[in-house]
Image (cartoon, rainbow, N blue to C red):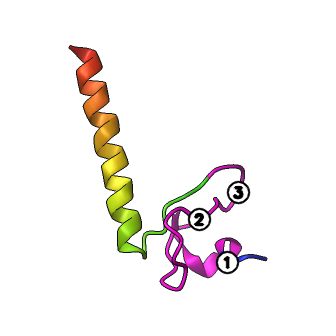
Amino acid sequence: MNNTNKPSFWKFGLFYFNKEDQRIFPPKRFGLGWTVNFANPVSIIAFLMILTVIVLIGNFLKQ
């Protein structure tokens, strides 16, 4: 079992939070893809930047 599967690192079963894991986007607990390590400040900044770009593109396409 790798670190991303340990239940103690998942808050409410949804949010990955592991201070010892330096990865910005570790693999998801289930399925394919990646998740955000909310214990890593760089991960939070990267997540917010991606979210901002998505919102800006959505607003641009509406016009």
Name the spot of residue 57 as percent of width and height, x first: 30, 28
- Nearest-to-viewer mark from 2 and 1: 2
Which residue is drawn at the image coordinates 49% and 61% (left, top)? 36
Query: Which residue is identified by label 2?
Result: 26
Instruction: Say which label, 3 or 1, has the lower sequence index.
Output: 1
User: Magenta stretch mostly in which secondary structure?
Assistant: loop
* Outermost residue, bottom side: 20
Query: Which residue is identified by label 1?
Result: 3
Badge number at residue 29:
none
Q: Amino acid at mark 3?
A: Phe
Secondary structure state at the residue bearing disc 2: loop
Q: Nearer the viewer, residue 42 or 63?
A: 42
Name the spot of residue 60 as percent of width and height, x first: 24, 22
Q: CA distance from mark 2 to mark 3?
A: 12 Å
Q: Is residue 9 above or below residue 35?
A: below
- In the picture, measured across the screen, residue 49 lies left or right of residue 23, that is left
- Nearest-to-viewer mark from 2 and 3: 2
Whether residue 23 is in magenta: the answer is yes
Which residue is drawn at the image coordinates 43% and 69% (left, top)? 38
Which residue is drawn at the image coordinates 57% and 78% (left, top)? 9
Give the magenta part as a residue range. 4-33
- In the picture, measured across the screen, residue 36 lies left or right of residue 52, that is right
Q: CA distance from mark 2 to mark 1?
A: 9 Å
Tag 3 near tag 1, CB within 8 Å: no
Q: Amino acid at mark 2?
A: Pro
Q: CA distance from mark 3 to mark 1?
A: 13 Å
Query: Which residue is identified by label 3?
Result: 30
Q: Nearer the viewer, residue 54 or 17?
A: 54
Tag 2 near tag 1, CB within 8 Å: yes
